[in-house]
Image (cartoon, rainbow, N blue to C red):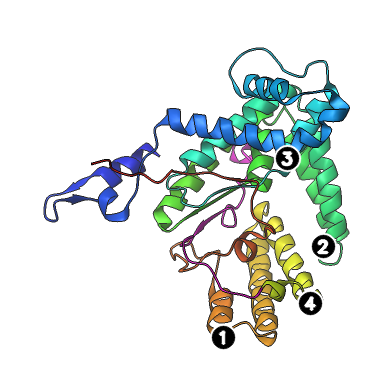
Amino acid sequence: GKVFENLLASYNPETKTTARKQTGSFYTPREIVNYMVDESLIAYLKNKLSSLQGEQLLDDETLDKELHVLTSFDSKVPFADNPELQREIISALSSCTILDPACGSGAFPMGILQKMVHILQKLDPENKIWKEVQLEKARKESEAAFEIEDKQAREERLLEINEAFDQSINDPDYARKLFLIENCIYGVDIQPIATQISKLRFFISLVVEQKVNAEKDNFGIRPLPNLETKFMEANTLIGIKKDGGLFETDEVKKLENELKIVRHKIFSLKSKERKIAWREKDKELREKLSKALKNQGLPLDAAEKLAGWDPYDQNASSPFFDAEWMFGTKGGFDVVIGNPPYIKER
């Protein structure tokens, strides 16, 4: 991130400008990142837990105070006398979807990852609840993906989860980070180099949690996940115009669900051959979905844009952004975070 920021700030004597000025890029101080991350997560958790307040006998003021303690570096563990509420918070973190629509070198996505890991460390130091949540989620996903996955693939998925939590192989934070990255965090930037550096930061954050074993292949370091469908190159200011009902037919829903499953599968694939095969499946589904939308009345230009977008071309930036098409998210994100608009006072 620092390298990227320094490159953006480099001065070009011929044009008398910096790359930062040319591209409108800004570096956010760590203090601002931390504050915005804390307040975003607290707001999300308050919304999630508000329906439980009657059962758990928590008023708004107490909940707000305890959640601020939870995100702080205070050694106190909040809700210690309420294990059910702790479990609800852990489950809420696992299902939270977070987007930075102009992620740059990944300051906000990395900041929110680190804070979510910190919360999990406080509430679940042994990773027991976090593991239960991930195994349950994997079982549900396996049922949803039954038609396009075989029994061996589903068994491999459960094995991967158990290996992620194996403390003889990885530090506890590895499993926390891996599943937060897989299920929760998304980033978009118009500059391909920015998303590449974001992915690099996330790769490094996983590598440092693995234990080196000189007697094993690759020193025991597990292959890193595929982040092409987590950090994408696109212009988030330009959307695709489509009628509200276009994504609601049975055919479109089925294809859209299959595409979501395929991209989720690609995240954890290890071999080059399987990656190529599943990327071809992704392309095939994109074309089918585009054709189905076109048949339902989506303008030709919009349908061709959707079909032509390739998430695995990391050197191209899409001229449009559609969260449902690109990330498979319906109804938006739980948290949208990023740089505020900077206005120069005169």
Give the alpha-carbon distance from disc 2 to disc 4, as whole Å.
Answer: 19 Å
Give the alpha-carbon distance from disc 1 to disc 4, as whole Å.
Answer: 19 Å
Earlier-in-chain disc, 3 versus 2: 3
Q: Is residue 177 left or right of residue 251?
A: left
Which residue bears the numbered disc 4? 251
Q: Position of residue 48 (x, y in %)?
A: 74, 38
Looking at the rendered image, the quarter that the N terminus falls into is top left
Give the alpha-carbon distance from disc 3 to disc 1, as whole Å.
Answer: 38 Å
Which residue bears the numbered disc 2? 149
Give the alpha-carbon distance from disc 3 to disc 4, as whole Å.
Answer: 29 Å
Earlier-in-chain disc, 2 versus 1: 2
Compared with 211, 163 (above or below) is below
Q: Secondary structure at mark 3?
A: helix
Looking at the image, is mark 2 or mark 4 nearer the viewer?
4
Earlier-in-chain disc, 3 versus 1: 3
Q: Secondary structure at mark 4?
A: helix
Q: Are marks 3 and 2 in contact (CB under 8 Å)?
A: no
Residue 175 visible in image? no
What is the span of residues highlighted in magenta in the rendered image?
215-243
Give the alpha-carbon distance from disc 3 to disc 2, as whole Å.
Answer: 23 Å
Q: Position of residue 237 (x, y in %)?
A: 46, 61
Q: Nearer the viewer, residue 306 or 346?
A: 346
Which residue bears the numbered disc 1? 300
Which residue bears the numbered disc 3? 94
The amino acid marked with disc number 2 is Glu
At horizontal 51% and vertical 47% (from top left) the residue drawn is: 199
Looking at the image, is mark 2 or mark 1 nearer the viewer?
1
Q: Are marks 1 and 4 in contact (CB under 8 Å)?
A: no
Compared with 78, 216 (above or below) is below
